[in-house]
Image: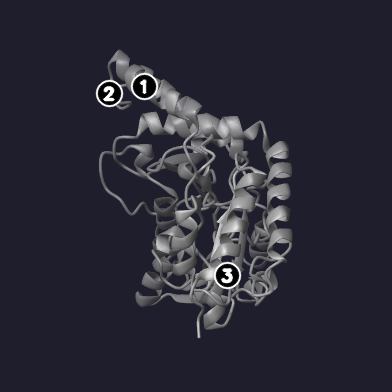
C-alpha cells in the first residue's frame, strides 16, 4: 500500500494504512448513500439496503448471520458494550473472570465493575507470555456471570485458545457469558464462534478507517444496552450509522478474506527475518513467544530506553512502538502482567507487520537498531 522507499511503517498493531480500494469505496458511498438509513423515503431505503449488505459481508467473515452483527464506533466501544451490558443484565451472580493482559477497553470496564462490587478475578499470563486456560476455568463457578479473553494479545502477539476456553466455560456453567476481544485476531487468524456469546472487531486494524467497528452478539443472547437514543442497531448502539465507513470496513474484510493463506506466508517470512536478525544483538531479549502470531514481535533492548530508540528510528524513517498505542507511553500492561523486570519493560519495542511490508522494512529496522545501540546513551 505504501511504496515510499524512505518510510518503513512497522506499527500495524496500532493501526493499518487504509487500502486505496477501500478509500474509493467509501468516497463512492458518501456520494451515493447520503440519505439516513432510518428514513422512510426511497433514498433512505437505498441506504438501508447498502447498510444491510455491509452487515452481511462482515458477518460472513465471522461465520455469523447478519442479524448477529451490530456496527459500533470502534473495537473499544464494542468491548465496553459487551462487558458492561452483560454484567448489568445478569443479576444472579457477581463473579467475572478475565485475563490479566487485556486491552484497556476491557481492563478498565473490569476495574469499574470491581469498584461496583463485582468479584473480578484476573488471571495473569505466564512469564513466557502464554495464558494458562486451565487457571481461568478453575475460577468459573455457579456464580460466574462473565468470562472475557482477547484472542490475540496486542503487545506480544500471544494467541489464546479461546475455543477451548469458551467450551470449558460452558461445560462448567452454561449460563456464563463468554466475550472475546477479536480486534487483533480478525482477518489474521481463524475465528470460530462456537460457545462465544460476543466478539468485537475494529476496522482500522484491517486497512479500513478509524471510527468503525462491529460487535457480534450470538442469536438469542441478551445484554442490557448501556446507551439510550434513537433505536438504531436494534437499540443496541443508537445513533445514526456511519454508513460509508461500514461499507468500507466490509470492503476491507472481503478483500482480506480472499488472501489469508498468502498473507500468512508473507508475515511468517517477515517475522522470521526479524527474529533471525535480532540474534546479532546480544543485548536483545525476545518477549513474544515462538508461537505468537507472525504479525507481532515484541523484544527488549535492555540497555536503551524505548522512547530513546523510537526517536532514533524515526529519524531513519522506521516507525515502531513501545507497546499498545492506547497506553501513550505508559509502561506496558502486558509485560508488567508477565512479571518481567523493570528494565526489560522500559526498553521494549513492538514491531508489527502487515502483508504489504517488505524485507527491506525489516532490514531498515535492524540497521536502525544497530546504529542506535552503537551510538545512543545506555541505561546505567
Percent coordinates x, y for residue 185 in the rendering: 60, 50
Percent coordinates x, y for residue 209 in the rendering: 42, 39
Depth order, front residue of 299/196: 299
| Residue at mark 3 to residue at mark 1: CA–CA distance | 58 Å
Q: Residue at the spot x=26%, y=39% of the render?
A: 230
Disc nearer the start of the sequence (2/3): 2
Whether 58 is drawn above or below 305: the answer is: above
Nearer the observer: mark 3 or 1; the answer is: 3
Please report contact status of discs 2 and 3: CB closer than 8 Å, yes or no: no
Extreme front residue here? Answer: 375
* Residue 219 visible at all: yes
Whether 341 is drawn above or below 177: the answer is: below
Q: What residue did someone put label 3 on?
A: 374
Q: Residue at the spot x=52%, y=70% of the render?
A: 375
Percent coordinates x, y for residue 159 in the rendering: 66, 59
Crowd band around label 3 with a 10 angstrom C-alpha radius: few (<14), some (14–19), many (20+): few
SS assignment at label 1:
helix
Whether 66 is drawn above or below 367: the answer is: above
Q: How many numbered tags mark residues here?
A: 3
Q: What residue did someone put label 1 on?
A: 47
Depth order, front residue of 289/309: 309
Q: What residue did someone put label 2 on?
A: 39
Nearer the observer: mark 2 or 3; the answer is: 3
Please report contact status of discs 1 and 2: CB closer than 8 Å, yes or no: yes
| Residue at mark 2 to residue at mark 3: CA–CA distance | 63 Å
- Image quarter where the N terminus lies is top right
Q: Is residue 117 toward the left or the right of residue 220 in the image? A: left
Q: Residue at the spot x=49%, y=53% of the render?
A: 316
SS assignment at label 3:
helix
Disc nearer the start of the sequence (3/1): 1
SS assignment at label 2:
loop
Amino acid at each position: 500500500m505504501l511504496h515510499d522507499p524512505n518510510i518503513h511503517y512497522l506499527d500495524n498493531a496500532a493501526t493499518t494504512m487504509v487500502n486505496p480500494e477501500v478509500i474509493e469505496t467509501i468516497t463512492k458511498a458518501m456520494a451515493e448513500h447520503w440519505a439516513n438509513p432510518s428514513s422512510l423515503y426511497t433514498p433512505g431505503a437505498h441506504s438501508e439496503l447498502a447498510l444491510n449488505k455491509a452487515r452481511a459481508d462482515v458477518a460472513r467473515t465471522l461465520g455469523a448471520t447478519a442479524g448477529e452483527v451490530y456496527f459500533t464506533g470502534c473495537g473499544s466501544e464494542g468491548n465496553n458494550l459487551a462487558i458492561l451490558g452483560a454484567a448489568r443484565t445478569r443479576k444472579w451472580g457477581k463473579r467475572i473472570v478475565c485475563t490479566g493482559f487485556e486491552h484497556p477497553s476491557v481492563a478498565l470496564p473490569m476495574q469499574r465493575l470491581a469498584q461496583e462490587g463485582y468479584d473480578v478475578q484476573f488471571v495473569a499470563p505466564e512469564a513466557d507470555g502464554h495464558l494458562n486456560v486451565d487457571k481461568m476455568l478453575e475460577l468459573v463457578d455457579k456464580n460466574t456471570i462473565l468470562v472475557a479473553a482477547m484472542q490475540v494479545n496486542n503487545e506480544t502477539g500471544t494467541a489464546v485458545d479461546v475455543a477451548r476456553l469458551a467450551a470449558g466455560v460452558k461445560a462448567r456453567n452454561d449460563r456464563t457469558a463468554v466475550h472475546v476481544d477479536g480486534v487483533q485476531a480478525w482477518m489474521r487468524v481463524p475465528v470460530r464462534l462456537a460457545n462465544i456469546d460476543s466478539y468485537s472487531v475494529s476496522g482500522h486494524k484491517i486497512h479500513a478507517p478509524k471510527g468503525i467497528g462491529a460487535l457480534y452478539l450470538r442469536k438469542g443472547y441478551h445484554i442490557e444496552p448501556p446507551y439510550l437514543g434513537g433505536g438504531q442497531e436494534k437499540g443496541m448502539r443508537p445513533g445514526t450509522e456511519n454508513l460509508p465507513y461500514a461499507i468500507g470496513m466490509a470492503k476491507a474484510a472481503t478483500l482480506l478474506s480472499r488472501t489469508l493463506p498468502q498473507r500468512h506466508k508473507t508475515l511468517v517470512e517477515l517475522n522470521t527475518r526479524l527474529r533471525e536478525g535480532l540474534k546479532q544483538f546480544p543485548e536483545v531479549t525476545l518477549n513474544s513467544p515462538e508461537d505468537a502470531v507472525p504479525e507481532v514481535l515484541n523484544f527488549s533492548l535492555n540497555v536503551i530506553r524505548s522512547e530513546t530508540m523510537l526517536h532514533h528510528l524515526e529519524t531513519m524513517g522506521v516507525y515502531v512502538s513501545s507497546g499498545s498505542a492506547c497506553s501513550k507511553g505508559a509502561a506496558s500492561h502486558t509485560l508488567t502482567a508477565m512479571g518481567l523486570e523493570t528494565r526489560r519493560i522500559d526498553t521494549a519495542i513492538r514491531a508489527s507487520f502487515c502483508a504489504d511490508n517488505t524485507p527491506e522494512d525489516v532490514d531498515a529496522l535492524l540497521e536502525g537498531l544497530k546504529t542506535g545501540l552503537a551510538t545512543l546513551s545506555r541505561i546505567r
